Image (cartoon, rainbow, N blue to C red):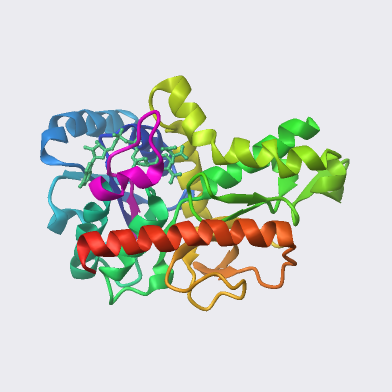
Amino acid sequence: MAEPVRVLVTGAAGQIAYSLLYSIAKGDVFGKDQPIALVLLDIAPMMPVLEGVVMELQDCALPLLREVIPTDKGEVAFKDLDAAILVGSMPRRDGMERKDLLKANVAIFKSQGESLEKYAKKTVKVLVVGNPANTNCLIAAKSAPSIPKENFSCLTRLDHNRASSQVAMRCGISAEFVKNVIIWGNHSSTQYPDVHHCKVNKQGKDVACFDAVKDEAWLKGDFISTVQQRGAAVIKARKLSSAMSAAKAICDHMRDIWTGTQEGNFISMGVYSTGNSYGVPEDLIYSFPVTIKDKTWKIVDGLAINDFSRAKMDATAAELVEERDTAVSFLGV
Ligand SMILES: NC(=O)C1=CN([C@@H]2O[C@H](COP(=O)(O)OP(=O)(O)OC[C@H]3O[C@@H](n4cnc5c(N)ncnc54)[C@H](O)[C@@H]3O)[C@@H](O)[C@H]2O)C=CC1
Ligand SMILES: O=C([O-])CC(=O)C(=O)O
């Protein structure tokens, strides 16, 4: 059997981690034959809770889980990592925008970027989940200059899954029959869920989403705002932010990095914008449609962009520029 992959989850005593750790430990992400060493980072006051999570992981008696390492120390957490899933940070509450978390959270990602730089393998794949995810990811990447920027990505797969599911429910089919929705831009209420290149498989045939749904007003109106506001709707209902669906999306994202995307399919993730062909400003972490092969993502080029889409892609880019500039002014990076 292969050597264990060493995987860090931060915020390991929190609610997303509680759903995520079991899926990783049972092989949903890195493969059913791949042993795993799980490193669990949280802050010192959460160590007693984390001990309970460790006990539960042990009690799952999972064949692939070779080692569990709970810690509150960066030098232990970030050492020799193959993958880092950075969740740990403050979640928003009802009435807040994700960018309201910038001041509270961005310093965490600067310091964790610095720890990645010091202790992790240069091949480490880093997924940033903590909000505001795109800007935190950019700051982490900038704080780890010897790790390629391409190794960093942020989670917009939850938005992607939400969009696929909305289309599927509207068509009365399962979400597996909807492919190639796109989330452009920021994981925020300015994100642009775009179905112009989306295909719906109806009775074995791929049909353009607009033809399958037959309701352009909905696709250009309520569909977009529902996906943009879905995180806030869950908070309003649960009084806590999405956790089960976030964990599922993290698994989808990291599994696709590890094993690649299917031929003809693309998925959405926040990646480094420098060199993109869509006129998105450079030096942002912006969500694009990507394919993945050999653990390397590539932005899907050449998709036609109409004026409706262009305006929305530009608006979300402008928000990211503003967030980046605010973060840089806080931190001086
Ligand atoms: N990108 C996305 O799609 C999504 C992002 N999120 C974000 O994920 C983050 C975590 O959410 P939850 O698990 O619900 O929050 P939570 O509050 O349940 O758990 C967060 C955990 O992080 C820990 N933590 C705080 N600072 C830390 C640090 N410096 N190092 C290590 N651990 C630290 C806390 O002690 C806590 O155990 C939030 O920022 C939330 O907004 C949530 C859902 C989706
Ligand atoms: O909305 C939030 O604050 C949590 C989150 O990012 C999401 O559910 O998409």
Count of numbered marks = 0
Q: Is residue 94 magenta?
A: yes
Q: Is residue 217 above or below residue 1?
A: above
- Residue drawn 33% across the image and 67% down it: 141
Q: Position of residue 143 (x, y in %)?
A: 25, 68
In front: 187, or 78? Answer: 187
252 on left or right of 214:
left
162 on left or right of 177:
left
Can residue 130 be seen in this snapshot? Answer: no
Q: Position of residue 88 (x, y in %)?
A: 28, 44
- Residue drawn 72% across the image and 50% down it: 195
- Which span of residues is magenta-colored? 83-104
Can residue 191 be seen in this snapshot? Answer: yes
Q: Position of residue 230 (x, y in %)?
A: 54, 34
- Residue drawn 27% across the image and 33% down it: 58
Q: Is residue 269 magenta?
A: no
